[in-house]
Amino acid sequence: MSCGEPHETDCSEVLDHLYEFLDHEMPDTDCTKFEQHFEECSPCLEKYGLEQAVKKLVKRCCGHDDVPTDLRSKVMGRIDLIRSGQSVPDSDVTATADGT
């Protein structure tokens, strides 16, 4: 996704780190770069708005359930694998809670 215009911060970088921005998990200097990008790039601003709305909806509908510690660890481990560029084996993705 890109508006076709050159930006100081590339659209792919913004979209790759969108949830870090949404979750306030990045340095202020990076947040400032992203905010500037959103002012210049309407497709990225639209994607930001959509992801922000989805995040609010999930929080409203699912934010009251306690997440089992082992599930949280598994999900975070998979996220780390994906961020590092490694693939997640299909068996890991399709396995159920009882291990089948």
Image (tube, rainbow, N blue to C red):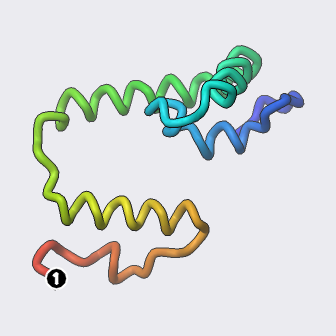
Q: Quadrant of the N terminus?
A: top right
Indicate whether 68 appears above or below 94: above
Residue 41 image-quadrant placement: top right
Q: Quadrant of the C terminus?
A: bottom left
For residue 6, side relative to residue 40 (left or right):
right
Query: Callout 1: helix, strand or loop?
Result: loop
Could you say which is closer to the camera, residue 18 or residue 25?
25
Q: How many marks?
A: 1
Q: Outermost residue toward the right?
A: 6
Q: Which residue was labeled with disc 1? A: 99
Could you say which is closer to the camera, residue 21 or residue 87?
21
Q: Rate crowding at label 1 as few (under 14), some (14 to 19) or many (20 or more) other CA atoms within 10 Å.
A: few
- Please give the name of the residue rendered at 73% of the width and 37% of the height, measured from the top-left corner: 11
- Please give the name of the residue rendered at 60% of the width and 68% of the height, measured from the top-left corner: 85
Image location (x, y in percent) of residue 12: 71, 44
- Please give the name of the residue rendered at 39% of the width and 66% of the height, measured from the top-left corner: 77
Indicate whether 35 appears above or below 67: above
Image location (x, y in percent) of residue 72: 25, 58
- Please give the name of the residue rendered at 39% of the width and 80% of the height, measured from the top-left corner: 90
Residue 91 image-quadrant placement: bottom left
Could you say which is closer to the camera, residue 46 or residue 35?
35
For residue 50, side relative to residue 31 (left or right):
left
Q: Which amino acid type corresponds to the residue marked 1 in the rendered image?
A: Gly
